[in-house]
Image (cartoon, rainbow, N blue to C red):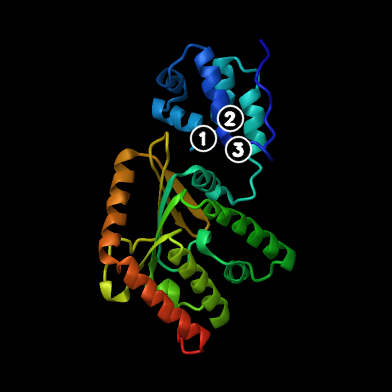
Amino acid sequence: MPGPKDLDPSTSPRAMIGAELRHARENAGLSQAELGEPLFVSGSFIGQLESGTRRLQLEYAVRIDEILGTKGFFERNCRALARSKYPDHFVEAAEAEAVATGIRHYLPLLIPGLLQTPAYAAALFRTYRPTACDAEIEELVATRMERTHLLDHPTTPLLWVILDEAAIHRPVGGPATMAMALRHTADLAHRHRVILQVLPFAAGAHAGMGGSLKLMEFRDAPPLCFIEGVDMGKLVDDPATVARHNLTFNLLQAAALSPQDSLALLETVTHAYEHGEQHP
């Protein structure tokens, strides 16, 4: 029987690696738990690799090839797939985001990447990298805009965003850029492509003051949570931790304005930017 075929990382998502892993494991007569045992991981972790919601790390790929007798297949493809256009700390989150059926996101200071316009993203990247050449900034913006194509599908993923009021009052890129960014966000809400809430200053102290929070749900795998800071991020799959962060998001939903009131506030602030009336 011929062995598995090496995958082209430019055309094959990691879900295909997962499918090959499931095929090889079943051919070896092992359950997910039995494969996970020598790797010191749970059977559910193997399931996440097979469903494509988790990235196969090189250390696991090498050991899997040894256990399943796949002659370096997973190591070769793992090395190929490691060449990502995303920062190391965001690679797994970006790949999980791409296959998620539901995404709930709270950001305290920024409009989320999936809702950003090119001008808004460019202003952010230029702030982060003040000495970068224009070509580097353009490449970063292009990569971010590629992610926004997740919203081209009319219903999937279900996206629920809670914006802190600070994010809409901070004039990233200046009034014109902010007006365009907020108008784009409002348009997505009007088209029912995103459920949008604003957490107002009047809410006072709230459950999300520790930072950003992204929760992702999947059709055939347990939910994940992504916690992000400056040049760092962590993808969490521990059920108790994910449940705790899920409660945090629920508390933020309860403290935020309704979607209707949130959209009205967004329209008011957008109008102010468009007419030079908005002040930082």
For the residues bearing labels 2 and 1, Cβ distance under 8 angstroms: yes
Name the residue tied to disc 2. Answer: 17
Residue beneath disc 1: 52
Quarter of the figure with residue 174? bottom right
Residue 130 point in image, percent of width and height:
64, 71
Q: Give the amino acid type for the residue marked by disc 1 in the picture.
A: Gly
What residue lies at 30% left-to-right and 67% top-to-bottom?
Answer: 258
Question: What is the spatial separation of the Cα atoms under label 3 and label 1, in whole angstroms?
Answer: 8 Å
Relative to 140, residue 77 above or below: above
Q: Is residue 107 above or below residue 49?
A: below
Q: Is residue 156 left or right of residue 137?
A: left
Foreground pick, 25 / 272: 272
- Identified at 44% across, 66% down, the residue is 190
For label 1, the crowd category at 10 Å Cα-Cα, with few meaning under 14, some 14 to 19 and many 20 or more, is many
Q: Position of residue 53 (x, y in %)?
A: 48, 38
| Amino acid type assigned to the residue bearing label 2 in the image | Ile
Front-most of residues 33 and 22: 22
Tag of residue 228:
none
Between the C-alphas of marks 2 and 1, the distance is: 7 Å
Name the spot of residue 279 as percent of width and height, x first.
45, 87
**Could one spot residue 95 in this view of the protein?**
yes
| Disc 2, SS | helix
Q: Nearer the viewer, residue 96 or 191?
A: 191
Q: Position of residue 57 (x, y in %)?
A: 55, 34
Precedes in sequence: disc 2 or disc 1: 2
Report how far apart the C-alphas of labels 3 and 2 lie in the structure.
8 Å
Quadrant position of the N terminus in the picture? top right
Label number found at residue 13: 3
**In this picture, residue 275 sits left or right of residue 209:** right
Q: Residue at x 32, y 39 (%)?
A: 239
Cβ–Cβ under 8 Å for marks 3 and 1: yes
